[in-house]
Image (tube, rainbow, N blue to C red):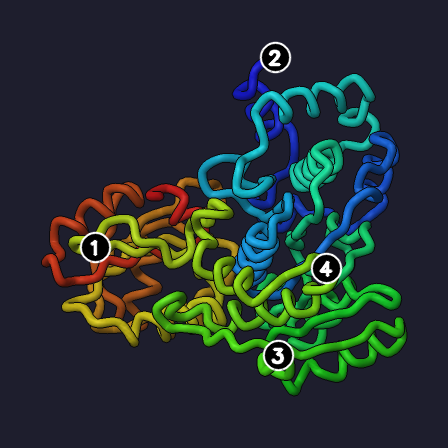
Amino acid sequence: MKNYQSILSFLYRQLPMHQRIGPKAIKLDLSNIISLMDLLDNPQDQLKYVHVTGTNGKGSVSHYIASILQEAGHKVGLYTSPHYKDFRERCKINGQLIPKNYVVAFVNRLKVLGAFETLKPSFFEISVALAFDYFASSKVDGVVLEVGLGGRLDSTNIITPVLSVITNIGLDHQNTLGDTLVAIAGEKAGIIKQDIPVLIGEYQKEVKPVFEKKANSLDAPLYYSRDLLNKTSIQVKEAINPFYRRNVETSLSASYLLKDLFNISEQHQRNGIENVRKNCYYIGRFQTLVSSPRVLADGAHNLPGLKALFGGIAKMSFGRLHIVLAMVGDKPLDKVLALFPKDAKYYFAKADIPRGKNKTVLKNEASSYGLLGKEYISVRKALAAAKQSAHKNDLVLVTGSIYTVAEVI
């Protein structure tokens, strides 16, 4: 296969992909990624990593940390998932997407090695292996590596980082990670390594013993973000980030722990937070798409994420709220829908993936929570209707899943 589109078609068609089909695409087993990296001579062993997991905020924290490292003058690899519009968003160096020809050459190399026939890797395993290979060949100074799901058995968890970061613990992916905060924390704590410092972004009493027991067993120094904030004079401004305040604080705390290794100053921290979108091609989170009426897109989809989103929106000034809503169909929505404001006008659609929840079913479920509106044949049509209905001082919000946002940004 010679061109990028044929390679992408092969990856999407042949490999199980959580983004499209959900939990049955997940392989919670490290043996495959270990074998895959052995085939490639283990390029991941050449790199310095900041490993980031958590229920919410791990993508934001990863981008902020990468931006701060860039401001300190470093060549920084950033791996995140899933992507919004372009597969190459998963793998960036200083905000630049991985070149198409590198993706093509890498997949063809795996075909020559027989990896697809012998290992039958998942989509995620291929994307992680690609990132390791690309960052090593590009000789980056450091990599910020976001966990895909959980931590303990996630494909990214074959590295030894210089710092492990756990943003917070909430109820999400219970069918895979466990149905209690303690169980989920146990999976996330799997990224803690022998003698490697670990930072906890949000102090949560219920899961504190899980992290402390794991860290103590591995002699890993354990820090809480709230205890490190007095180490910097930087004030987190609401104007910089209206509702990701805790994520910013976690990122500043992480950069404090990294300051000697990467020669980070407070000016680097300040600039990194302010310039994150420019530095890191950071999209899809509290992103303004249009200014009048203001159209915001945010991929929040679970309880903690939506609480943070609506908490931030409550601090904003606008006329009426219009919500374009499409969600995935393999998660219970009762507690989630209860968070949505009843005085908003709703525009229901189906996200354009197999997992997308039927728009009529979504509308009916939402109406039982007092969320009223019409259904539309696509997210784009729903957004067009919302923009047409809204006055210039109103707010239009597109949310419900990453895949919903991907259709409009």
User: Gap between marks 3 and 1, in whole Å?
Assistant: 51 Å
Question: Rounded to the nearest whole Å, what is the CA distance between mark 1 and mark 4?
Answer: 39 Å
Report the side of 195 relative to 263 (left or right): right
Helix, strand or loop for disc 1:
strand
Q: What residue type is labelled 1?
A: Lys
Mark 2 highlights which residue? 2
| First reached walking from the N terminus: tag 2 or tag 3 | 2
Which residue is painted at 29% across and 58% down in the image?
A: 397
Secondary structure beneath dot 2 equals loop
Q: What residue type is labelled 4?
A: Gly
Task: Using the rendered image of the protein, determine whether residue 108 is visible from the camera's viewpoint.
Answer: yes
Label 4 and label 3: CA atoms lie apart by 28 Å
**SS at circle 4:** loop
Give the CA distance from mark 4 to mark 2.
35 Å
- Say what secondary structure mark 3 lies in: helix
Residue 322 in the image, given as x and y percentages of width and height: 22, 61
N-terminal-most mark, 4 or 3: 4
Q: What residue type is labelled 2?
A: Lys
Q: From mark 2 to mark 3, how far is it between C-alphas?
A: 52 Å
**Residue topped by disc 3:** 231
Report the residue at 51% width, 58% height from top.
272
User: What distance separates the C-alpha of mark 1 from that of mark 2?
Assistant: 45 Å
Q: Name the residue under label 4.
A: 151
Look at the numbered discs 4 and 3 and tell me whether their residues touch, using CB distance below 8 Å.
no
